[in-house]
Every structure is written in C-alpha cells, then in structure tokens.
C-alpha cells in the first residue's frame, strides 16, 4: 500500500472516530483518543524508519509527516495516565521534524531521530490500545503484543 494511501485511510479513520461521537458510539474523549492513535498508527512511521535505515534515503514528505504527527499528538485529548507519555512522544516527533528541516539533512542524525520517534510510537500505541481495550471492557487486553 502506498504511503499516501495509508495517510488518506488514517485521516478517514480520524474523521470516522469524530463522527462516532455525534452518533453516540462512545464518549467524546474516547472517540478523540481513537482518532488520534489511528492517525498516528496509520502515518507510515514504521515504513519511513525502515526506508531510512535500510536504504539511506529520506522520503520527500518525511518532515511534513513528522509535523503532522506532532500536531495530532499535541492536540488529542489523551487520558491523564497517557498525557505525560504523549508529550514525550510529541517531543520526539518535534526532534524528528527539526532534523529533517534542512536542504541536506545529516542522515545519521535523521536516522537516530526517526528511530527514536518510531520506538516511542510503538510503546505509546501499545499503551493507548491497552487503555482503549480496558475502556471497552474487552478480554485479552493485557496480552496485546508489540508489532
């Protein structure tokens, strides 16, 4: 699946989660959390990290993606127990955007920043989905594995 398609699907999930609130599907806060983490999960950070690490090529839209990820992370109303972790992840996305803000970015520094953001995202996503599974009272939430 192309990176642009993944972003479009993630945006659709983001919009759909907000629509759930209007239809009474779940609480406003949970819908926002679902929208936020769905956008972050669908942004293609894993693929971007793999491309940079394995090929040494930086995708043309990498900085834009980093800025969008930081924006969504900062603007989503995360529950209190995830707020500190969300702010730390937003800082990692900010560092990634900063390292990409150059006509000729330092590949090693970019690789480090993207890998740090990627690793932070994995941990955060895991914790958010555990939180949401708990909110939904679905079984097996504690056995969720990292991707």
Image (spheres, grey):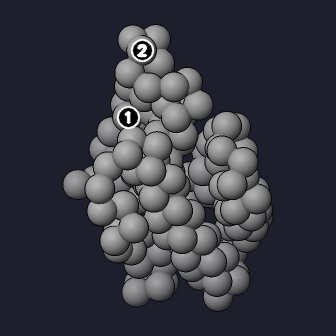
Residue placed under numbered mark 1 in the picture: 13
Is there any visible trace of residue 126 in the rendered image?
Answer: yes
Q: Nearer the viewer, mark 2 or mark 1?
A: 2
Q: Secondary structure at mark 1?
A: helix
Q: Position of residue 14 (x, y in %)?
A: 45, 33
Q: Position of residue 127 (x, y in %)?
A: 52, 62
Which of the image's four quarters has the N terminus? bottom left
Q: Residue at x 72, y 48 (%)?
A: 80
Q: Position of residue 34 (x, y in %)?
A: 47, 40
Q: Residue at x 67, y 37 (%)?
A: 77
Q: Position of residue 123 (x, y in %)?
A: 54, 71
Identify the mark nearer the N-term, 2 or 1: 1
Q: Residue at x 54, y 40 (%)?
A: 33
Give whichever of 10, 61 is nearer the camera. Answer: 10
Residue placed under numbered mark 2 in the picture: 24
| 80 displayed left or right of 13 | right
Give whichever of 147, 55 is nearer the camera. Answer: 147
Give whichever of 133, 54 is nearer the camera. Answer: 133
When the figure is inspected, residue 89 is found, relative to residue 30, above or below; the finding is below
Calculate the distance from the C-alpha at mark 2 to the C-alpha at mark 1.
16 Å
Q: Secondary structure at mark 2?
A: loop
Which of the image's four quarters has the C terminus? bottom left
Q: Quadrant of residue 130?
A: bottom left
Pointer 2: residues within 10 angstroms few (<14), some, or many (20+)? few
Question: Outermost residue toward the left?
Answer: 1
When the figure is inspected, residue 130 is found, relative to residue 52, above or below; the finding is above
Give the label on residue 78, or none: none
Q: Residue at x 51, y 25 (%)?
A: 27
């Amino acid at each position: 699946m192309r990176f642009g398609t993944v972003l479009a699907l993630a945006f659709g999930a983001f919009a759909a989660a907000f629509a759930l609130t209007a239809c009474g599907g779940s609480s406003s806060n949970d819908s926002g959390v679902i929208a936020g983490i769905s956008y972050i999960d669908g942004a293609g950070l894993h693929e971007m990290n793999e491309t940079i690490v394995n090929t040494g090529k930086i995708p043309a839209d990498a900085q834009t993606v980093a800025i969008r990820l930081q924006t969504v992370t900062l603007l989503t109303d995360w529950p209190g127990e995830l707020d500190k972790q969300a702010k730390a992840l937003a800082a990692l996305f900010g560092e990634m955007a900063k390292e990409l803000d150059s006509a000729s970015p330092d590949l090693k520094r970019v690789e480090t920043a993207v890998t740090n953001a990627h690793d932070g995202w994995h941990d955060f996503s895991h914790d958010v989905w555990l939180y949401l599974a708990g909110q939904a009272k679905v079984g097996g939430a504690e056995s969720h594995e990292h991707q």
